[in-house]
Amino acid sequence: MPELGEYAVYVLTSYAATLVLLAAIVGLSVRRSRRVKRTLQEIERG
Amino acid sequence: MSIWEYSNPKKFMDWTAPVVPWTFGLAALACGAGLVWGFFLTPEADKFGSTVKIIYLHVPAALMAINAWFMMLVASLIWVIRRHHVSALAARAAAPVGMVMTVIALVTGAIWGMPTWGTYWVWDPRLTSFMILFLFYLGYIALWEAIEDPDTAADLTSVLCVVGSVFAILSRYAVRFWNQGLHQGTSVPVATGGRTVSDVYFVPLVLCMVGFGLLFLALVLLRTRTEIRARRIRALTARAHRA
């Protein structure tokens, strides 16, 4: 872990917020993609 | 073969299927390398201390927030001029990704502002235009959701996209236009080449910018594929109701 000094809370909060937001958009996109794909397959199979 | 044939929904699904996982993989590699390098292996800056490490999040996110809107503008204009459904769906797919990039830029900018400017927020031209860009993203997404007919939604959101482009341009050039406020000028001006970031920070920053760009591309391709499938579901369901 690098020495962040008095600004540690600002740096770590920035990284945490960014990683959470990126994980959220990737996770939601992948989940919806799978759900829609499965629904289409079910409809096409009849 | 014309380039427009790639925007045929069937062809688009075919060529993007193998591209999406590779793009995600390359994005993870570039983002991982850039962020690890930037966070663990770069020194503190004289002016910013350790907060300089926020640059690896803030600059790539801000870059993609603006470029995502321009990508949506191009896709919207293609829809308006050539009526390619995939381009309208690609614009729709890009909006939430662009909005998340805008939120990251605003949040990391606010957090960075406190130790450097002594405040989380000021009504500075660049910050204000970025906030308005975020509101345009919200409005764009809401408009798509509010209109039932997809062609009408694509038409109206295209108009909104053209109007919002003013704020995307202002977000990029606000510092140059008004020459006031707290926010500094562009750190890596591509046109002039006169970057203000020293070499030790520049390489991981470029890696992060490439990584965020690839992540945006991967997400837009994935989400466009989802929108194409959702459109097919609506068509099949409507056909079943008519029968």
Image (cartoon, grey):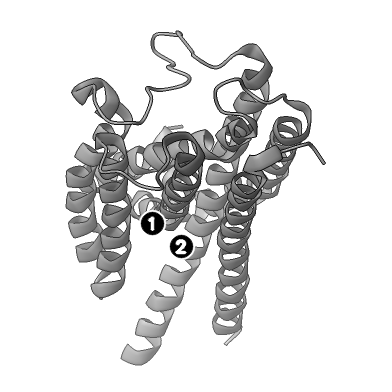
Q: Tell me the mark number nearer the camera, choosing from 1 and 2.
A: 1
Q: Is residue B243 visible?
A: no
Most foreground residue, B152 or B129? B129
Residue B35: x %, y % from top left: 70, 37
Residue furthest out toward the right: A1
Q: Amino acid at mark 1?
A: Leu
Residue B180: x %, y % from top left: 24, 26
Left or right: residue B39 versus residue B144 is: right
Residue B42: x %, y % from top left: 73, 25
Label number found at residue B89: 1
Q: Which chain does the numbered disc 1 sit on?
A: B
Is mark 1 in CB contact (under 8 Å) with mark 2? yes
Crowding near pointer 2: few (<14 within 10 Å), some, many (20+)?
A: many
The Cα atoms of the two marked residues, 1 and 2, are separated by 7 Å
The N terminus of chain A: image quadrant:
top right
Residue B100, relative to residue B118: is it above or below? below
Q: Secondary structure at mark 2?
A: helix
Most foreground residue, B188 or B139? B188
The C terminus of chain A: image quadrant:
bottom right
Residue B207, relative to residue B123: is it above or below? above
